[in-house]
Image: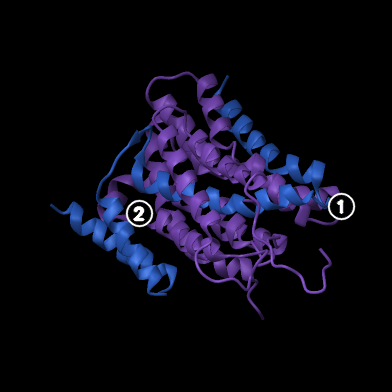
Chain colours: A blue, B purple
Amino acid sequence: MSIWSLILVLGIAGVLMKVIGPALAGGKKLPERLGDVIDLFPLALLASLVTTGVATHGQAIVIDDRLVGAAFGLVVLLLRAPMVVAGAVAACVCALLRLQ
Amino acid sequence: MKVPTGLRKSMPFALATIPVGIAFGVLAAPELGAFFTIAMSAIVWAGGAQFAAVSILSSGGALLPAAVAGIVANARYLPMGFAVAPSMSGPLHRRMFQAATLTDASFVIGREPDGKFDLDTIAWAAPLQYLAWVGGTVIGAIGAHALPDPDALGLDVVYPVFFLSLLIPELRNRVNDPASRGWDRRRLAVVLLAGATAASTTPVAPAGIPIVAGSVVAFVGLAWRAPRRIEEGRSS
């Protein structure tokens, strides 16, 4: 396998995974039970993304300054500030903690 | 001229993507060379898959395991595609084009209050994210030595906080029962269970699997049904 093959395989596989569902089931109405699952799917995905983004590094669970930064970001969000402000606050807190 | 919703909402995510793209450029260029690094971001356009594949190569692994790792890292797009499918209409080639524009951020941005997905929003969220990803990679691959360390600026926490900002309204969202108040215990349980599943599978599973495992927690919806508003005039 060459680097080009690797790149093409990953590119094609990624697109395939995204389009298989819409190609097979596009526009079709789902049974109600499945609708309840799909309704929860973004929530579960987001929770997973936040958890892995804040508390993991590669294959290890790492609790560090990111958690503190994210906590400040959460407070800012609960105060109904825009997400960009929350992100900036979290980054600043994180950067300041890392100065030590 | 009105700015399309997807384009507007994707802007903060695109900005946050730039440092991640730079990080990939910095990581991959010593391994693949600047040309292949940039080509990879342009053709694959999937941070998870790219980081997974390159980190295997960097630690001495062969190309085949790197390919497998990259494919596995993208696995969550399979259920995401199926989740979006019912909201689609139109011919096959248009459905496939719209699906190809999916990313984590556009998946959630494109969600409508009734639980369906707005495919125009999702598609319009793609161009800025793509430009940011490839542009960041170019900067990282070519100019790494001149840049400050993104981690020193705390930039690695920005993406998760953006996802957190989407999680909060999603937690409060009540598709079936909009009039009710108070916490939805079901949705809270899903958040905690999904987070715990993603965290606990991280040490034991390859990159990408923990996120799929956490997302699969949504299947509790099969057993734990959403509360529904009682309709007027229904005979019981």
Name the residue: 31% across, 59% down. Answer: A71
Viewer-side label of 2, 1:
2
* Alpha-carbon span between mark 2 and mark 1: 40 Å
Q: Which residue is mark 1?
A: B91
Q: Position of residue B110 (x, y in %)?
A: 64, 61
Q: Tell me the residue that label 2 is attached to.
A: B157
- In the depicted view, which residue is nearer to us: B158 or B21? B158
Q: Decide which of A38, B220 is in the foreground and name it.
A: B220
Query: At which x and y percent is residue B10?
Result: 55, 63
B37 relative position to B235: left or right: left
State the residue at coordinates (51%, 57%): B185
User: What type is the residue that disc 2 sits on?
Assistant: Val
| Co-location on one chain, circles 2 and 1 | yes
Q: Quadrant of the N terminus of chain B?
A: bottom right
Of the two numbered discs 2 and 1 on the same chain, state the one appearing first in sequence. Answer: 1
The furthest residue to the bottom = B1
Question: Residue at the location (57% across, 70% down)?
Answer: B8
